[in-house]
Image (cartoon, rainbow, N blue to C red):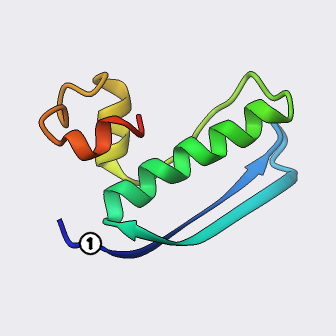
């Protein structure tokens, strides 16, 4: 994979679409898939830390969606990502 500086960012909204909070981090090394996976982990961790338990995560990266749905079956051979999921 093409490795470079990457960033993560996300928005957390309530069930009515109202903005609750956002997050952004940068200056890490990785590729696009690693950035997307890290974003999911950071967003879910932030939600959990503020007491949010019923969470719907929307993602536009098919590889991340497939990885989460298939319990790592499709990317298991890529060990550099399994520690994130």
Figure quadrant of the N terminus: bottom left
Figure quadrant of the C terminus: top left
- x and y percent of residue 36 in the render? 44, 55
Q: Nearer the viewer, residue 18 or 4?
A: 4
- x and y percent of residue 55 in the render? 68, 29
The residue sitting at 26% across, 28% down in the picture is: 72
The residue sitting at 80% across, 29% down in the picture is: 52
Q: Is residue 77 left or right of residue 85?
A: left
The residue sitting at 42% across, 40% down in the picture is: 84
Q: Which residue in the rendered view is the most extreme toward the left?
A: 77
Q: Is residue 17 left or right of residue 72?
A: right
Query: Is 56 above or below relative to 71?
Result: below
Q: Which residue is mark 1?
A: 3
- Residue 40 seen by the camera: yes
Local SS, label 1: loop
- x and y percent of residue 37 in the render? 43, 48
Query: Is 8 above or below relative to 79?
Result: below
- x and y percent of residue 63 in the render? 28, 46
Q: Nearer the viewer, residue 29 or 50?
A: 29
Q: Which quadrant of the figure has residue 53?
A: top right
Q: Is residue 11 left or right of residue 82?
A: right
Q: Count the marks: how many?
A: 1
Mark 1 Cα within 10 Å, few/some/many (few <14, many 20+)? few
Q: Is residue 47 left or right of residue 78?
A: right
Query: Is 25 above or below relative to 80?
Result: below
Q: Which quadrant of the figure has residue 45?
A: top right
- Residue 58 seen by the camera: no
Query: Is 19 above or below relative to 82?
Result: below
The residue sitting at 79% across, 47% down in the picture is: 13
């Amino acid at each position: 994979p093409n490795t470079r500086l990457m960033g993560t960012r996300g928005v957390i909204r309530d069930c009515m679409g109202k903005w609750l909070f956002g997050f952004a981090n940068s200056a890490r090394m990785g590729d696009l898939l690693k950035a997307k996976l890290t974003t999911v982990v950071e967003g879910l961790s932030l939600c959990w830390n503020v007491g949010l338990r019923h969470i719907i995560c929307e993602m536009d990266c098919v590889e991340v969606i497939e990885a989460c749905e298939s319990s790592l079956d499709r990317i298991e051979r890529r060990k550099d990502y399994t520690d994130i999921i």
